[in-house]
Amino acid sequence: KYLKSGVSNPLQPQSNTPEPANQGVQGYLIITDRCVGAGLELKSAGWFTFSTIAGFNVDTLPVYAKRSQRMVITKCTHPTYIPSHFPEFPDPHTYIKTPVKCMFLMLAASQRRDVERALTRFMAKTGETESLFKDDISAFPLIAAKPSAIPYLSALLPSELELQTLEETDSSEQDDQTDTENNSSNVSQDDQSADKENVVLPPGGVVPTGKANEENMIDNPYLRLVKKHKGRRKKLKFIY
Amino acid sequence: MLSYKQNPDPSGLHSRRMNRKKDKGFEICINNINFQRKSVIGYVELTIFPTVMNLNRIKLNSKQCRIYRVRVNDLEAPFIYNDPTLEVCHHESKQRNLNYFSSAYTAAVSAVDPDAGNGELSIKVPSELWKQGDEMKVMKVYIEFSLDQPKGGLHFVVPDVDGSMAERAAHVFSFGNQNSTRFWFPCVDSYSELCTWKLEFTVDASMVAVSCGDLVETVYTHDMRKKTFHYMLPIPTAAPNISLAVGPFEILVDPYMHEVTHFCLPQLLPLLKQTMSYLHEIFEFYEEILTCRYPYSCFKTVFVDEAYVQVSSYASMSIFSTNLLHSGMIIDQTPVTRRCLAQALAQQFFGCFISRMSWSDEWVLKGISGYIYGLYLKKTFGVNEYRHWIKEELDKIVEYELKMGGVLLHPTFSGGKEKDNPTPHLHFSIRHPHTLSWEYYKMFQCKAHLVMRLIENRISMEFMLQVFNKLLSLASTASSQKYQSHMWSQMLVSTSGFLKSISNVSGKDIGPLIKQWVDQSGVVKFFGSFAFNRKRNVLELEIRQDYTSSGTQKYVGPIKVTVQELDGSFNHTLQIEENSLKHDIPCHSKSRRNKKKKIPLMNGEEVDMDLSAMDADSPLLWIRIDPDMSILRKVEFEQADFMWQYQLRFERDVVAQEEAISALEIFPTPASRLALTDILEQDQCFYKVRIQACFCLAKIANSMMSTWTGPPAMKSLFTRMFCCKSCPNIVKTNNFINFQSYFLQKTMPVAMALLRDVQNLCPKEVLNFILDLIKYNDNRKNKFSDNYYRAELIDALTNSLTPAISINNEVRTVDNLNTDVRLILEEITRFLNMEKLLPSYRNTITVSCLRAIRMLQKNGHIPSDPSLFKSYAQYGHFVDVRIAALEAVIDYTRGTHFVLTTNFLCLSFSMLGKLGPFSWSGIFFIFQLVCLLQRLGHNTISPNLMLIFSIYREVLHPSYVQKLFSFIIFIKERYSFTILTGKS
């Protein structure tokens, strides 16, 4: 509700609250909200953000807090095999994950869907659409399919979101498989330099400058320098 | 610019080659490749060693090339160019049937067959050289040619964006069905004509030319705007094994093997690194089992867009579809790609390095490469996967042969015209690779490797590998010799040579086996049943055969039967003879004893079983016929339901488990349900068996609808395995680290959605459950992508759909939408729209959404309308999406809304009817599309037929397209059907 009035109010004077814009901003706000939420979650292991509380009856909180199956987190003491001179464990809330309750999961899920729906509806309303129904074109708007010149790129390369996820899971698992992203940036930087130097490599040539020395050691004909033209005779030599 | 040099080597092996030359060296030079015009200019130079006196005419193969001049030893030579396949039926107007077309087409292909010394290009040796020819001196033939907008042989991919060709990722690569090199340069286009090669390609400085052999050097042209790639291939190689790929490729030197280089299109390098990270293991595996080094000094892999086939192998390089590349997050594609790489590498040894003597020896090469590929599968993916694969392949070939007729591995073509063709009515001649149907060839390859496995069973794997090693070492010795030493024929494999090696190495006579499976077509069809004779304590087994139906043959010889009794598992070898059907097998165990004792299994394991289900009088638990799949057969065996259940639970062989599952489909009882559920829950069980159990359970549940108790099948199991403990309707955050449970998690909802209640609707509970899975799906903590999982959840929604109840044929509108359907449609809309913003790998989600929408239309929930699919079928969408969209369009035309009106269609369809069921589907497919285009005013998809073919190139094989194309030209001439504009 707050959102709605907040968004539509400033817009009202100019137009009659364009619905797509409203949805777009709403989507944006929800995203920001989620980011903040995520940040909070990390800090305090709690989910108490504006949006999660919205629509939630505060009066039930004390009852919830006094529920019988409440989990009490006690501070861990050292197990016997850890010498006592080691520092004590920090407060439990810093490393123990608060058990996530269904309600929050549900809320988070429906929020995510709301974001997605708002976003896609926004996109659908601002761009070309296709419809499954002749009578009501706006019922299930589908963003029109646009052919792309190089369709395999978007179909094969991981989306930014996926790369981000990968990075997150990797950093948490101490896995070093993150080079995918680094490399792609290296490649783009390398683009022009490779061309200028007239190396054998095509644009987007592989050898990132850092690795250049190492790779030059490898005797691979495709990494060798291109020779300058030395007249016809030279060429014929290889024919026979 | 491309130039190549073929040193032809017409060995005098075939006496019928009267005017045959010998080519020893071949040089090809392509000087200019124009991406804008899609044209190529170059020359070739062949060095010919005449083997006959009076060589005054040289025949070469060449298709669609424009030949400017031909010189023999620097003298201008006159030439005639005639390609009979361009106009197969001339202006024949009386015979308008397909048989006529087929025989005319075969004749046209024969007329230019290089193995018979024929060719499209006939060069007259200048009379000044005749004397020289008599002395059998070397001749050099120089041919200048150009190629404009090639329809085959070379494929140009030029994306329609701004920028230079390199920035646009424009590339060109060679492709072809069997020996199709003649499409891009004049040559002796035969697998048996070996020669050494020198190849030169001048390309734009921003491009790379990848070709066969060693890259000797790269030199800039004078103006520094182009560079020339010089390749040398000293190993004698046949022209069909020569290839080329030019493009602005990114280069990756294999970190484990520096002589191996990988190429991919711009921006895909990270994927290439990931995809290629295990290639060295495949190399090591093959080199180890063959005890032979990889024959070429280097190896190159090139990944190209719009590839006709996923994998094609050429001398020292392989060309793959770029769609095989994947990132580390993708689970499902990884094994598929690994298999493709392994296949390509196996063909490097057998197919490229070792070539074939003639077309009828093809089975040896396909068989060996398929067989060693199988060994790789066994080693990498395990014995379960291997046996599962063998069973799958066996089922495939058996199904094909029983339905379509026999597949003949080694046709001799000795007698009459089409005597060797087992099923001439179903497909075109099997005499030439170019007239063969694609499907038949696929099955041919499948059968070839299965027969190799049978040979292995007979002579042991050790001997088998020794034979391969012998072939390879002979070939590699020969390859280093000069042509004049006449050793090169060792690099060609023939059926007789191969069989001789086998008998030399193993000392065994495999004649009967070869006669049974190689020299004749067909598979064996067994029916088995049994009775237990309590008095004699004997199992009376009856094995009957059907050898009269098409695609079958009679089997006489040994067969293994495994009987699991209470006292253990026993193998028996029975002799299948002419007239004996019944076999008595003495049982080892007295019938049921009272004492509880563990039951020994085949693998030595001893298990407790609940024996209450079995017949008290009989000690038999289950019986298997030919458990090792050492006959190409189909077995229909009758045993009681409890025996199948025991077999499913306790037999450790995955093939037996799968057989038991398919048998249990007709026994919808609580006991079957329990057996299947137990298997589903057992995580030691092979995951593909568990997946199969899911679908069987759904079927059984539907048959038991009225008596079914408890929650819908699999629901509680899924909840237990994948949902949160505290809230059972919410699925846990995705974690696909355990692949077995990932595949199960993906499959269970799809199978569950097939459940139906008494009204024949998908139970509300199941639908809500699937919707919840979609709603709570959370992949943020997963290191793998969930695109295949989400796609399968959409498939599950599709499976849940049932025909709408329509009242008075009302028009479907938004308002009268069923509530469940509304929910489903909401999800599909959201998924499809999200895909535009965050596309999934291989657009799996779009593909599933399109199928779901078509299903909604088909079931009458939403108005049936092909316009959405038409837009997705356009060029410029990912190929999987286009195929899915086209399938939907075709499906639409099959609906009631489409009426075939024009005379032309009636005529052509009645003609097509003569093709038989096999080619029918494919051609029907295309024709429906053509009709559709015509009906719709062809505004969205170009009416150009070649374009339609190019849409189908992933679905249809080039030879098929070629055949079809000729056929359509044929029809076009008859009926002046103007929509078909193609090359004339």
Image (tube, rainbow, N blue to C red):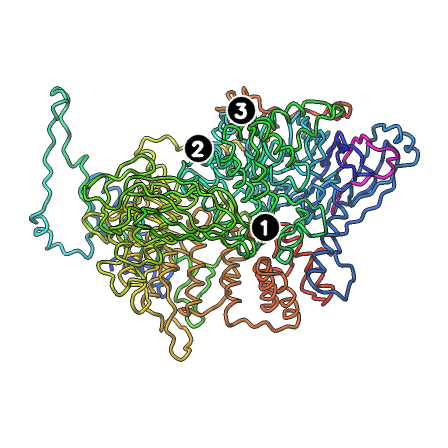
Kindly identify the residue that appears in the image at 47 percent across and 59 percent down. Answer: A144
Q: CA distance from mark 3 to mark 2?
A: 16 Å
Dot 1, how many residues are within 10 Å of its Cα: few (below 14), some (14-19), or many (20+)?
A: many
Residue linked to disc 2: B379
For numbered disc 3, what is the local secondary structure?
loop
Q: Looking at the picture, do discs 2 and 1 lie on one chain?
A: yes
- Say above or below: B678 vs A184: below
| Residue B291, label in figure | 3
Q: Position of residue A225 (x, y in %)?
A: 62, 24
Magenta-colored stretch includes residue B49:
yes
- Say above or below: B580 vs A195: below
Give the mark nearer the N terminus: 2 vs 1.
2
Residue linked to disc 1: B440
Q: Quadrant of the N terminus of chain A?
A: bottom left
Give the mark nearer the N terminus: 3 vs 2.
3
Q: Which residues are magenta?
A: B43-63
Q: Quadrant of the C terminus of chain A?
A: top right
- Left or right of B857? Residue B696 is left
Q: Position of residue B529 (x, y in %)?
A: 39, 53
